[in-house]
Image: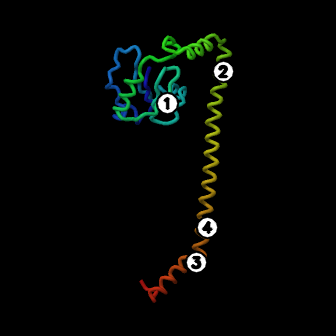
Amino acid sequence: MLIIFFTFSPFSHTHFFHFDIIDFAGSSTQLVADVDCTAEGKDLCETHGVKGYPTLKWGDPSDLQDYQGGRTYDDLKKFADENLKPICSVKNIDLCDEDKKAEILKFQAMPAAKLDELITAEEKKLEDAEKDFKDAVAELQAKYTALSEEKDKKIEDVKAAGLGLMKSVKMAAKTGSDEL
């Protein structure tokens, strides 16, 4: 199990991510790593779908998950203590429940071409979900822009109709003068 900090050059090795003080040295099951997505780690970042920095991912190296927890040292230390241990995976099938073992064995028994086909289909679903999301956000942004422009036009029309002058006349009538 591992935690990877995906960063870009200005963030690399900053105090924010000084997690290296947790001693995983010599551990055969735990690793904390820092990857610079603008340098040698660019391919790894692309492989794992890193879109923003800093990004934290954790888990089995072949199936890294987004880390959603806190970013303080204490949060990360607690998470590492609780989660950076062997879990159910292809390499640790003995830690899996019967359903997960059966699923792993089913995929292992498949011809490589069939497994590639399934992976491609599932990755396409992820791409489609991302595209649908971006399209919906673009529609919302267009609607927001139109509403904002409509509101600004209405405000401009109200002001052009003399609202400011009306308020001045009303105020002058109350005080009997138009002087300040």
Q: In the shown orientation, is residue 69 left or right of residue 107?
A: left
Image quadrant of residue 115? top right
- Of the numbered discs 2 and 4, the one sitting upstream in the chain is 2
Which residue shows up at 65% across the image and 18% down it?
Answer: 116
- Residue 168, placed above or below residue 69: below
- Of the numbered discs 2 and 1, the one sitting upstream in the chain is 1
Amino acid identity at mark 3:
Gly
Secondary structure type for disc 2: helix
Q: How much space separates mark 3 and mark 1, taking CA atoms?
A: 56 Å
Q: Which residue is mark 1?
A: 66
Q: Which residue is mark 2?
A: 118
Secondary structure type for disc 3: loop
x, y percentage for residue 38? Answer: 48, 31
- Of the numbered discs 3 and 1, the one sitting upstream in the chain is 1
- CB under 8 Å between callouts 2 and 4? no
Which label belongs to residue 162?
3
- CB under 8 Å between callouts 4 and 1? no
Q: Which residue is mark 4?
A: 154
- Of the numbered discs 4 and 1, the one sitting upstream in the chain is 1
x, y percentage for residue 9? Answer: 42, 34
